[in-house]
Image: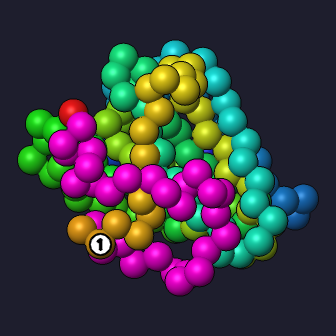
Amino acid sequence: MNSVIIKPGNLQGIYDITLAPNTDHRGYFTRLYDVNIMKAHGLHRNWVQENRSFSKQKGTIRGLHFQHEPHAETKLIWVSKGAILDVFVDVRQDSPTFGCYESRVLSEENFAMVYISPGFAHGFCTLVDNCEVVYKVDNVYSPAHEGGILWKDASLQIPWPVDQPIMSAKDQVLPTLDTLKRRD
């Protein structure tokens, strides 16, 4: 039976999940989600949607996205193909770590997942071509409640591994964290 290691991140509400696959001469088998293990750690959610994002080119940035209450969402992120730098920023106004971020390399080879609680903006940068990111969410998408932070917000100082990313037009004009503070 494969095991799962769950450790809290440095920011409250972030959890690193590492899968330990069973391997043999054929390859491997791993359980991606086990309701009993997640319940034992207080992390089980009623996942209402599972999304798959495919990026063709290295250096693609998606994010930083979140949803405002009452549609804030928990995310469970993993990479089924390729590798990404996964980034999450605390946007909870009452949090002592508001504006702080963490990042992780998630890849098909390291069997790492990240659990992101509501109140975090999330984004990632592809580290190789042809990346596939899969994530579960516990709230439905609501365009009226979507929010975001500019990927290159100087106040965050996120060390993205690319200077000229491939991005959507929408993500290139997201507001800064300072604007978010004034809005809420």
> Quadrant of residue 157 in the image?
bottom left
**Residue at image location 68% in from the left, 51% down from the top:** 133
Q: How many marks?
A: 1
Image quarter in which the C terminus is found: top left
Identified by mark 1, the residue type is Ala
**Secondary structure mainly formed by the magenta segment:** loop
In terms of depth relative to the viewer, which is nearer, 150 or 103?
150
Q: Is residue 28 visible?
A: yes
Q: Is residue 7 left or right of residue 162?
A: left
Q: Position of residue 122 (x, y in %)?
A: 45, 49
Q: Which residue is mark 1?
A: 154
**Residue at image location 36% in from the left, 72% down from the top:** 158
Q: Is residue 13 left or right of residue 47?
A: left
- Residue 162 belongs to the span the image colors magenta: yes
In terms of depth relative to the viewer, which is nearer, 165 or 13?
165
Q: Position of residue 15 (x, y in %)?
A: 37, 46
The magenta stretch spans which residues? 156-183
